[in-house]
Image: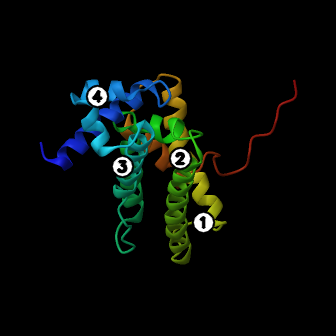
């Protein structure tokens, strides 16, 4: 097997193990068993379990970032935003990526925490720039773009996280549609609010 292919196979096996067992319960032996390689082969590519976990995380983060397409302001902005939401949710749900990105990556060590912070900073920064552009051309509501970006990230992350914790089967299209509707129209209906009835 070509060295690049062997490394990819080790990363794939490691991702499967970390997703099923979690970082702390997983072992290099678990990875070797799934990859079907000897211990020496593993250490030709990675120094430790922590090193392969870092590589898996970096690959997942790159995957999530890579699915986002730039918005063409001359085209249908709403449908492009809807498509991006679905792609992001799809990447996060793909083979349990959410578990590694949202739970396992936090608190392992300072290096891992820095990687997660950098990932969220890049995501929020990219979204903030898009929101500023949208505000400038009149298609995004007024507000602090940095706070709006964080709210949108939460709107994407939390349905996955909460649904997965509850053991629910999550459907990308359904999640994307609900997130998109919230972004487009909010939650509280417009018009006068109903008066409270006294008991």
> 94 or 83: nearer the eye?
94
Q: CA distance from mark 1 to mark 2?
A: 35 Å
Residue ID for mark 4 = 32
Mark 1 or 2 closer to N-term?
2
Tell me which corner region of the image, top left, top right, bottom left or bottom right, holds residue 106: top right
Q: CA distance from mark 2 to mark 4?
A: 23 Å
Residue count near mark 1 (Cα–Cα under 10 Å), binned few <14, some 14–19, many ≥20 = few
The image position of residue 118, as x and y in percent, is 53, 57
Residue count near mark 4 (Cα–Cα under 10 Å), binned few <14, some 14–19, many ≥20 = some
Image quadrant containing the N terminus: top left
Of helix, strand and loop, which one carries label 4?
helix
On screen, residue 163 above or below 109:
above
The image position of residue 139, as x and y in percent, is 51, 69
> 5 or 104: nearer the eye?
5
The image position of residue 30, as x and y in percent, is 34, 24
Name the residue: 55% across, 59% down: 121
The image position of residue 75, as x and y in percent, is 34, 70
On screen, residue 162 above or below 73:
above
Question: In the image, which is nearer the foreground, mark 2 or mark 4?
Answer: 4
Residue ID for mark 1 = 141
Mark 3 or 4 closer to N-term?
4
Of helix, strand and loop, which one carries label 3?
helix
Of helix, strand and loop, which one carries label 2?
helix
Residue ID for mark 3 = 59
In the image: residue 5, left or right of residue 186? left
Residue ID for mark 2 = 112
């Amino acid at each position: 097997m070509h060295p690049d292919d062997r490394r990819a196979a080790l990363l794939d096996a490691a991702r499967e193990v970390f997703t099923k067992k979690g970082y702390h319960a997983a072992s290099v032996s678990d990875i070797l068993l799934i990859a079907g390689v000897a211990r020496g082969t593993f250490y030709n590519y990675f120094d430790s379990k922590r090193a392969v976990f870092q590589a898996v995380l970096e690959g997942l983060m790159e995957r999530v970032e890579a699915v986002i397409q730039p918005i063409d302001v001359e085209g249908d902005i709403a449908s492009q935003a809807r498509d991006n939401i679905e792609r992001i949710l799809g990447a996060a749900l793909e083979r349990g990526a959410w578990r590694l990105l949202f739970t396992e990556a936090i608190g392992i060590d300072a290096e891992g925490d820095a990687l997660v912070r950098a990932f969220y900073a890049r995501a929020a920064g990219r979204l903030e720039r898009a929101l500023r552009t949208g505000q400038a051309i009149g298609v995004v509501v007024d507000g602090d773009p940095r706070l709006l970006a964080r709210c949108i990230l939460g709107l994407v992350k939390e349905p996955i996280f909460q649904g997965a914790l509850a053991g629910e089967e999550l459907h990308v299209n359904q999640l994307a549609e609900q997130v998109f509707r919230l972004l487009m129209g909010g939650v509280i209906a417009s018009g006068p609010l109903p008066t409270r009835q006294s008991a």
